[in-house]
């Protein structure tokens, strides 16, 4: 079976490194594809002859390229009457207004962050082509693993002595371990979807539910077992309630600023800023340093939209399509 993976992130790397040897794998990274659409022919040629295309590509600084590349790919596949299967990776952020519920009576507003907006537009393109192509969309929850940004963020929070979270961190989130997911993807999901034709699938994948406090406590305990920690410092984190009067902050100026980030105005500014960065800076970023010791005397409080994230609880029954729980 010939498989093409389009993407250069952490999940893409894991999928490529764990692919079964019987799959003939080709990989393309969106950042390395030329900006001129006519130069994408090499990648598109591989896709024409592929049995499966796994699409995870996302360019953080180029909204037009994210849309144009997928549109070009779909157009090419339709022209050659392609009979393979396209698997598109989506995110729970697109479903946030449906599946994430807040325990506080906060007025809902649309989220116009660049990543979510891009995924919504791409999903709309896929739905338009679903009658002519075999397409599946996999919606991912919070993806955990040693290399993922989500777990690194939780690990950072766990290295504080006093942690303020809404409802003392009892709100739930859906999670998925990256190693468990990639094994399921290659060994269960791909064999299943390649046996079906002319079907537009949408599925929300998760491994389990966990509270934010449980996750932080688990990572804190694991850090203690991996590093030498003084007995006097071997105490659990103190979880305290964080109950803001307003949406993101008790400070009027900060609350207005964070609220502005949820509007179309900020989305336009973000696109313009990223276009400028793309022209003036390097594509590569230096790895951020990670702490190795518990900061026992420090205090964590969520800031901005981070507060809203910790304030929500996922409601799996509200997912508007199938859900699949992956068991290790």
Image: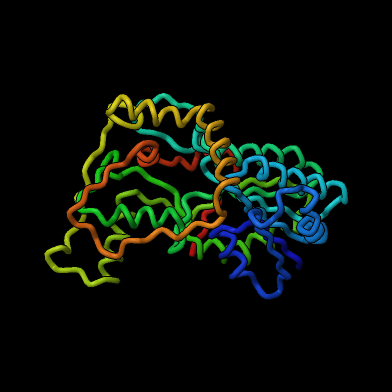
The answer to which of 259 and 142 lies nearer the viewer is: 259
Q: Residue at x 57, y 66 (%)?
A: 183
Q: Residue at x 20, y 49 (%)?
A: 162
- Left or right: 299 with respect to 141? left
The answer to which of 6 and 80 lies nearer the viewer is: 6
- Left or right: 209 with respect to 120? left
User: Which percent across, then down, holds residue 93?
Assistant: 51, 41
Residue 94 in view, yes or no: no
Residue 317 in view, yes or no: yes
Q: Residue at x 72, y 43 (%)?
A: 68
Q: Quadrant of residue 32?
A: bottom right
The answer to which of 222 and 65 lies nearer the viewer is: 65
Figure quadrant of the N terminus: bottom right
Q: Quadrant of residue 12?
A: bottom right
Residue that protrudes farthest toward the left in the picture: 232
The answer to which of 129 and 262 lies nearer the viewer is: 262
């Amino acid at each position: 079976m010939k498989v093409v993976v389009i993407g250069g992130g952490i999940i893409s790397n894991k999928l490529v490194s764990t692919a079964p040897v019987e799959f003939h794998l080709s990989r393309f990274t969106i950042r390395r594809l030329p900006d001129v659409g006519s130069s994408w022919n090499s990648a598109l040629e591989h896709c024409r002859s592929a049995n499966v295309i796994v699409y995870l590509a996302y360019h953080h600084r180029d909204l037009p390229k994210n849309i144009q590349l997928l549109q070009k790919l779909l157009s090419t596949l339709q022209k050659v009457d392609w009979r393979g299967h396209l698997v598109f990776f989506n995110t729970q952020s697109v479903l946030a207004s449906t599946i994430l519920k807040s325990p506080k009576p906060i007025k809902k507003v649309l989220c116009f962050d660049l990543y979510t907006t891009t995924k919504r537009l791409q999903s709309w393109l896929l739905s338009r082509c679903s009658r002519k192509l075999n397409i599946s969309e996999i919606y991912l929850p919070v993806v955990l693993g040693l290399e993922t940004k989500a777990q690194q963020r939780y690990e950072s929070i766990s290295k504080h002595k006093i942690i303020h979270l809404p409802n003392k961190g009892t709100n739930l989130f859906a999670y998925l371990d990256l190693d468990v997911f990639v094994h399921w993807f290659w060994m269960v999901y791909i064999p299943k979807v390649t046996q079906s034709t002319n079907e537009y699938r949408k599925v929300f994948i998760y491994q389990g539910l966990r509270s934010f406090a449980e996750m932080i406590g688990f990572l804190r305990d694991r850090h203690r077992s991996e590093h030498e920690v003084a007995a006097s410092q071997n105490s659990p984190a103190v979880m305290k309630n964080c109950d803001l009067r307003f949406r993101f902050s008790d400070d009027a100026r900060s609350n207005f600023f964070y609220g502005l980030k949820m509007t179309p105005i900020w989305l336009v500014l973000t696109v313009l800023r990223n276009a400028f960065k793309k022209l003036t800076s390097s594509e590569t970023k230096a790895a951020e340093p990670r702490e190795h010791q518990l900061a026992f005397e420090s205090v964590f409080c969520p800031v901005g939209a981070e507060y809203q994230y910790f304030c929500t609880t996922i409601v799996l029954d509200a997912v508007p399509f199938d859900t699949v729980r992956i068991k290790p």
